[in-house]
Amino acid sequence: MNQRCEACDFPLTLTDSDFCCERCSAHYVPQAYCPECHQPLQVLKACGATDYFCTHGHGLISKKRVEFSR
């Protein structure tokens, strides 16, 4: 992952909820992608847990395998 800030071109850090620029404090919403087909994943949230589901035939995807991009 080599995401950079649109405002200052500094590398972004992925937090639990977003991408954050440590230089200018800009925040960006991450999009989860399937590691198999690279299509956007459906995010399922319930009872404090977040799961990722591929609607293109790959089923539930572990958070450890999800590819994030902004």
Image (cartoon, rainbow, N blue to C red):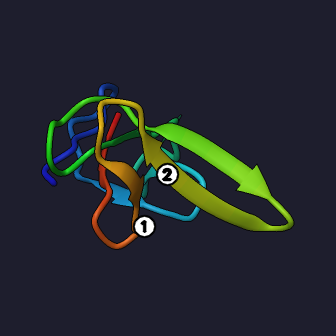
**Could you tell me which residue is drawn at 38 percent across and 59 percent down?**
61
- Look at the picture and state if 50 lies above or below 3: below
Between disc 1 and disc 2, whose residue precedes? Answer: 2
Would residue 28 be seen by someone viewing this image from the given angle?
Answer: no
Q: Which mark is residue 12?
A: none
**Could you tell me which residue is drawn at 14 percent across and 47 percent down?**
36
**Observer-nearest of 64 and 5:** 64
Are the residues tagged 1 and 2 within 8 Å (C-beta)? yes
Q: Disc 1 marks which residue?
A: 63
**Could you tell me which residue is drawn at 40 percent across and 68 percent down?**
62
**Observer-nearest of 48 and 3:** 48
The quadrant the C terminus occupies is top left
53 left or right of 4 in image: right
55 left or right of 5 in image: right
Which residue is the extreme one toward the bottom? 64
Marks 1 and 2, Cα distance to the nearest angstrom?
7 Å
**Could you tell me which residue is drawn at 26 percent across and 29 percent down?**
39
- Look at the picture and state if 26 lies above or below 67: above
**Observer-nearest of 58 and 51:** 58
Element at label 1:
loop
Q: Quadrant of residue 38?
A: top left
**Residue 41 place in picture, x, y as percent:** 42, 37
Which residue is the extreme one toward the front? 57
Q: Disc 2 marks which residue?
A: 52
Element at label 2:
strand
- Look at the picture and state if 64 lies above or below 45: below
Q: Quadrant of residue 1?
A: bottom left
Label 1 sits on what residue type?
Lys
Label 2 sits on what residue type?
Tyr
